[in-house]
Amino acid sequence: AEETTMSVSSSLKLPANSVSDDDLRAVSPALERYTKEALLGKVWQRPELTLRDRSILTVAALIAGLQTAEMPFHFALALDHGVRPAELSEIITHLAFYAGWGNAMAAVAVAKDIFSQRRIGIDQLPPAKEPLLPLNEDAEAKRATQVGNNFGTVSPGLVQNTTDVLFRDLWLRPALAPRDRSLVTVSALIANGQTAQIPYHLNRAMDNGLTQSQASEVLTHIAFYAGWPCAFSALPVVKDVFESRKK
Amino acid sequence: AEETTMSVSSSLKLPANSVSDDDLRAVSPALERYTKEALLGKVWQRPELTLRDRSILTVAALIAGLQTAEMPFHFALALDHGVRPAELSEIITHLAFYAGWGNAMAAVAVAKDIFSQRRIGIDQLPPAKEPLLPLNEDAEAKRATQVGNNFGTVSPGLVQNTTDVLFRDLWLRPALAPRDRSLVTVSALIANGQTAQIPYHLNRAMDNGLTQSQASEVLTHIAFYAGWPCAFSALPVVKDVFESRKK
Amino acid sequence: AEETTMSVSSSLKLPANSVSDDDLRAVSPALERYTKEALLGKVWQRPELTLRDRSILTVAALIAGLQTAEMPFHFALALDHGVRPAELSEIITHLAFYAGWGNAMAAVAVAKDIFSQRRIGIDQLPPAKEPLLPLNEDAEAKRATQVGNNFGTVSPGLVQNTTDVLFRDLWLRPALAPRDRSLVTVSALIANGQTAQIPYHLNRAMDNGLTQSQASEVLTHIAFYAGWPCAFSALPVVKDVFESRKK
């Protein structure tokens, strides 16, 4: 993967606030070493997650954290790691809802340049509207009832949009597999310190096929991109989810 | 409102990291659809909050989240929705304290261009210092006593500045109505996941005239700009405030 | 300090999104007044922390919050306040781990310009690898055992990297004194609302020589750069740490 990342880095037209290897060396030779050895050389090579999964996680953490300086490199790397343009497009769309509209728009500003450089046209993107995946009516009825009972009178509009726009529309769009959509969501929740929302979405991710070993490794990987405190604040919550699923 | 937003968008000189309709379509036709239909077409049209209130909420969430890509569009839209330049100036000043100095400075960098384009001069801005609104001495004494008892020895400097600079100065500046100042504060707290600070400020907002129906709708609206997880983490806290005020 | 800050400001080539005094005045004369009077004129002059400590805190809060607009000014000011280039470099490296890789990279993009303007070459930076400070084996064994017992099976990779890369490498690098490294960490935790991680690191900071009076003043200072809500959410946690250390 290091070879891949290096070649991407050198071929890519980087925007103003991006950081080249030379820039990094001119400020912190130590951070260059950690990047190449501990991060790209070791963490990214661990077998618990594929390079494609790691790219999905990283892209989601960068968008959730508005870390624009790293976006050009990692958006390009994600495409090199097998994330299809349609999937990158859909990750950004998904994170408009899970990290905020402005975060998604910052990602759009970066992705448009990457797509343009690689001659990725609208024919490779998910259409604005397309036939949806089948809904698990039982699971959705249970979710909607629980949220409705708890918060239906606190914010009727939020509860209604959650059902109509998120769980009966966005989550059913076929451009991103439910398991990958969950990976994006969990990554954003950890990166933004939204620990209270982790249990529902980590359970959903594991119901959607994420293994416990992969979920463990999400924390190992995301610690570097979201920072150690976010990963450590997620640890007890993830522990509880793992334990609750054993019963 | 959709018409308004479209005309603003096309007449505005957008900065480098802003996103045009064409850019958005070139990355995610779906996100363009959600923006125009679910967000501008539906949420912004709901009668529970005026366009002016929605613009105040949105501007505050963008500044709190440092979402610079969306600032030019929404600062201009706020002025079109009846937020006076003096009020936009004061919202930025207020958020220096409630979202951090650097967040306010990022907003200044955007607002100066908008003000310049619209020939808004210093005569339309609040003066650096002006006669303050009358203080509710009883409420402030109660607040100061409670904070002093809890934290007076933990950080005497913070407690003193909170009284002198915030509650006996900033909050009394007449350039922004107390109810609007509260709206800005609550929006920033939700957008930054500062749930522990919501009860005091939501109660203050409702004491300052925000109705329960409006507070409910704040969550509906802010979910799009701050992301769903922030809105959902605020829900139980808002619920508690609503219930405590019934007693 | 005000004189210093003013002269820095005028001599510095500011990047695109930075804010000059004129820009600030053109948007908010009030925010200019608060900056010069309440913040630079009063808080920065309080004797409880040195200018060097305040610059370390501020730089850390800006990097943790990705507040790039204020970085050029405060990176330059930190150097003027006696933070050595090697220390600024190491603060950025440290925050890659404690605030996320992308936050550090945004800081690198700013620091490279400051270093270039001041002709600070690689000879003034900490080497990529150098002899480490001696490890307090007992304290580290206790930490590693506790984290291992709690989370060793939840995320083995995260736990292993925490030991190998953080506490047996990064924290022992001599380029930043342990007490200053703690100051950077605590500042980032407060600024990012990571209250659950404050007790361990504030205790470590105080074990490393930070006095209670200095810790109190950290909150006074950081409130302006991270925003009041972050400081207030940290208050009860800091209070508990102070009380637990009296026993």
Image (cartoon, coloured by chain):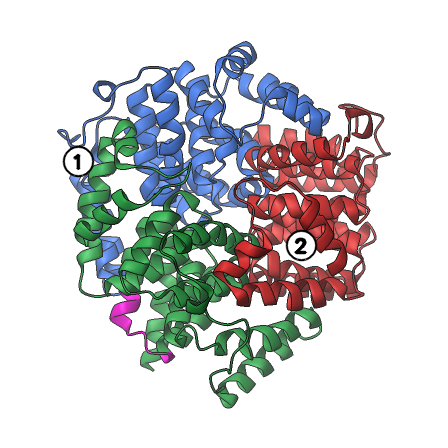
Chain colours: A red, B blue, C green
Q: Amino acid at mark 1?
A: Leu
Q: In this view of the protein, can residue B203 be seen by the observer?
A: no
What percent of the width, then of the height, locates residue B117? 38, 17
Q: Number of numbered discs present? A: 2
Element carrying mark 1:
loop
Q: Is A62 rendered above or below residue B202?
A: below
Q: Is C45 rendered above or below residue A125?
A: below
| Front-lying residue, C92 or B240 | C92
Q: Which residues are magenta?
A: C207-216
> Do the residues indicated by labels 2 and 1 lie within the same chain of the protein?
no
Q: Is A194 rendered above or below residue C153?
A: above
- Indicate which disc residue C188 carries: none
Q: Amino acid at mark 2?
A: Pro
Chain to which mark 1 belongs? B
Element carrying mark 2:
helix
What percent of the width, then of the height, locates residue B120? 30, 17
Q: Is residue B223 toward the left or the right of residue A123 in the image?
A: left
- Residue holding disc 2: A199
What percent of the width, then of the height, locates residue B19? 58, 27
**Quadrant of the rendered structure where residue C180 is?**
bottom left
